[in-house]
Amino acid sequence: MAFQEPEANKRGSNSNFPRTEKRILRFKMGPFALALDTKNSFAASSSATDASGRKMDNLQMVPKKFFASINNEEEKPFDFLRILFEGVIAGGTAGVVVETALYPIDTIKTRLQVARGGGQIALKGLYSGLLGNLAGVLPASAIFVGVYEPAKQKLLKMFPENLSAVAHLTAGALGGIAASFVRVPTEVIKQRMQTRQFASAPDAVRLIVSKEGFKGLYAGYGPFLLRDLPFDAIQFCIYEQLRIGYKLAVL
């Protein structure tokens, strides 16, 4: 195999040619000749190296995800009516389902609380007064979520990100206060129906108002708030913080 000197070298070492001139190496192998463009070969190899390097960088920048990914959507403008409507529908539906499923357990609890001297409780009529109770649970649950969701979104914009738990606590308490105006009369009527003091919810309302006035429907309002407001605030705060933690874990 014979090596042919590059054309640039044949012109002499003192030749003033631009450095960008192509240098061609020719290798003669018998009847065949192999010509290599050194500049283009170097550029091609450099571009291939850069491309592979970029691919490696991209691979390193993409973290491995073991859970479903959640895309961050653009922040939507605050739409009070839409949020209120969605909260009312979701809250009312959830309240009705939960109350229907757990009503017998609540009836047994109430009868145990009023039983005296270790007396036995009746297990009949565990769904006594359910329909009348649902008439109060539906609007109460709808009011709670309908107030909680808009309040939460407004408070999250007001508070810094590291105080999101305070926003959730406050929104839960506001939702509980708003719903308490329907919850308390519903609880009073439900408990008296469960202990068979009245035959129907309308009769219970009429007799309580006639004997005790409207304040009779709000008997125990203070203790109710002391119990339910912290419960609502803490429950929804923990729920929202767990949701945030899950999103951060999978992103």
Image (cartoon, rainbow, N blue to C red):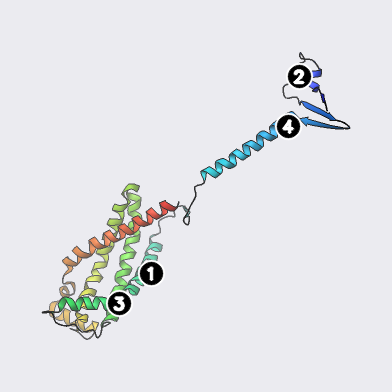
Q: Amino acid at mark 2?
A: Phe
Q: Residue 96, how many percent across, how many down?
A: 33, 74
| Extreme residue in the front direction | 1
User: What's the CA distance linking mark 3 and mark 4?
Assistant: 81 Å
Residue 242 is at least partly visible in this image: yes
| Extreme residue in the top direction | 14
The numbered disc on residue 36 is none
Identify the mark nearer the N-term, 3 or 1: 1
Q: Amino acid at mark 4?
A: Asn
User: What's the CA distance linking mark 4 and mark 1?
Assistant: 68 Å
**Image quadrant where one finds the N terminus:** top right
Identify the mark nearer the N-term, 2 or 3: 2
User: What's the CA distance linking mark 3 and mark 1?
Assistant: 15 Å
The numbered disc on residue 134 is 3
Circle nearer the viewer, 2 or 4? 4
| Extreme residue in the left direction | 117
Say what secondary structure mark 3 lies in.
helix
- Residue 54, compared with residue 68, is above or below; it is above
Circle nearer the viewer, 4 or 1? 4
Q: Residue 34, how many percent across, how many down?
A: 82, 32
Check disc 1 and report the residue beneath it.
89
